[in-house]
Amino acid sequence: MEKYFQNYNPTGSVVLSTFLAALPILVLLYLLALHPHKDKNGKRIMGIFAPYAAISAAIVGLLVSVLMMKMPVSTAVAAFAYGAANGLFPIGWIVFGAIFLYTLTVVTGQFDIVKNSVASITPDRRLQALLIAFSFGAFMEGASGFGTPVAVAGALMVGVGFKPMTAAVVCLIANTAPVAWGSIGTPILTLASVSGIDASLISMQAGRQLPFFSLIVPFWLVATLVFMDKGSWKDVWEVWPATLVSGLSFALTQLTMSQFGNVELVDIGSGIVSMVITTLFLKVWQPKHLMTHEDAHENVGNKKLEIPKYTGRQLAKAWAPWALMAIAVFTWGQTSFKNFFNGIFAPKIPVPFLHGVVFRTAPVVPQPTMEGAIYTFNFLTFAGTALMLASFVAGIFILKVTAEQWKETFKITFFRMRVPLTVICTVLGLGYMTRYAGTDAILGLAFTKTGTAYPFFAAMLGWLGVFLTGSDTSSNAMFGSLQHITADQLSLNPVLIVTSNSTGGVMGKMIDAQSIVVSTVACYDNHEEGMNAVGPIFRKVFPHSLALAILMGILVWLQAYVWTWMQVPFK
């Protein structure tokens, strides 16, 4: 088949090429968050049904790829199919597994015990959000990543009493600072492989940037939660001691582990330390006025909640599925485990009309480089498989689930997942199509023409990459080499600039359509209501994402020109 070499100025006008490259994304954003229409009840709302928005954007993306980029139709369709397949496995499979486990505990009545035991640590919803969304979510990000923390933490938060919209927004904001070391360090390891910079150096540099945000995000998260509940700054600062303990314990562990060059276990260690330290602190300190789920809009501080008392055996049984899940996900993330089981079953399927056809060109890469397209169906080591195995082991041996309960769990999970899976697959298909067409690189190259301001825009490029692809790993694979080339051209430290692609990228995780859809699946029982919430959630988290990305860009610029002592030397 004829080779396709990406052209980064196909119209002859940089401005026009950049605008057309951005058009599918602009269409997606407009339809998801801004297009006015009336729902079935006649109420005027902003943003259309998420599946329709995703499909419309994909059609525009296909037209841009074929008509502007001159990509063969068969190659464009193959790229979309490749992305959709990845949307189904592993992303959709992870979300299915998380929702299945949660539903199983609800159907068997065990989640009430989990909910009440969390409330026994603290009935305050601000502190519950810190424990579940930030600390536990960071552990899940480190162990698995790829949507798992938002799916699991979101389901837990709704289960303990948070409103679906609140739980979704809080979980998305919380899933920022840990992302660079997610899934046993996969984003940083990927960045190292494409940039040629040692992974330990990238981890060290990330450890001189992200701990600042690990300290900020818990306060940011609490403030967002409080103001969504129509609270005040007084309510935010009322829990500052616990917020500081949660963030500081995480940040110091993250800083320490990263400076020793660790890549794989930074998030796992930081999440565990933060969970343990914060829980112990809450044993000796509670806010004077509690903000409970019963009085979220009123600070009735002396209200006593009636929390049932459980035996150790009851608590162990209720928490067993979640403990098994954490153990399974951690085990599945180990390289030796993956290598062993991938050796047993992990068929690699070259994607027809795509693999060996697409080539990236200068200046994205020094010389034409083939963009491979091999779909690996490593089902045994998918994180979703770990979640399902944990569910079955817990259900059979601990919860003693009946045939009727298994049937109900499968029925509820399938019904809940059917529409969101369509959106996830469509959005991933669009992301892969832009990647193989080269329109993502056109957008990225626009950032490289900013001269001395480039350190700031290097972080923003990573942010854009994660928004486009839904993954810090994919963004690093896409722009890692470009960042290194640009750093050399501008005489900047390659370690600093390349790392900023990942650390800036993590701030875009909360606004990518894939993550938002995952959050709605986890938080909304009604799939139609969840899909209609995609636009409103995007509108709520976008300002947070942009503000955090700008702050990261400013930090990178300061490290490049002012605080140069914070740079990790390039060896």
Image (cartoon, grey):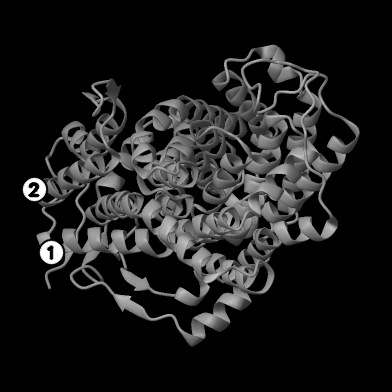
- Per the rendering, the mark at residue 67 is 2
Q: CA distance from mark 2 to mark 1?
A: 13 Å
Circle 1: element type = helix
Q: Is residue 505 left or right of residue 565?
A: left
- The residue that disc 1 covers is 74
In which quadrant of the rendered image does the N terminus lie? bottom left
Expressed as whole percent of the image width and height from the top left, the position of residue 78 reads 20, 64
- Per the rendering, the mark at residue 122 is none
Nearer to the camera, 425 or 183: 425
Circle 2: element type = helix
Residue that extends furthest to the left in the rendered view of this protein: 67
Nearer to the camera, 532 or 423: 532
Do the residues bearing badges 2 and 1 touch, measured as CB atoms within 8 Å?
no
Expressed as whole percent of the image width and height from the top left, the position of residue 459 reads 49, 37
Q: Is residue 66 left or right of residue 302?
A: left
Q: Residue at x 22, y 41 (%)?
A: 52
**Residue 234, quarter of picture:** top right
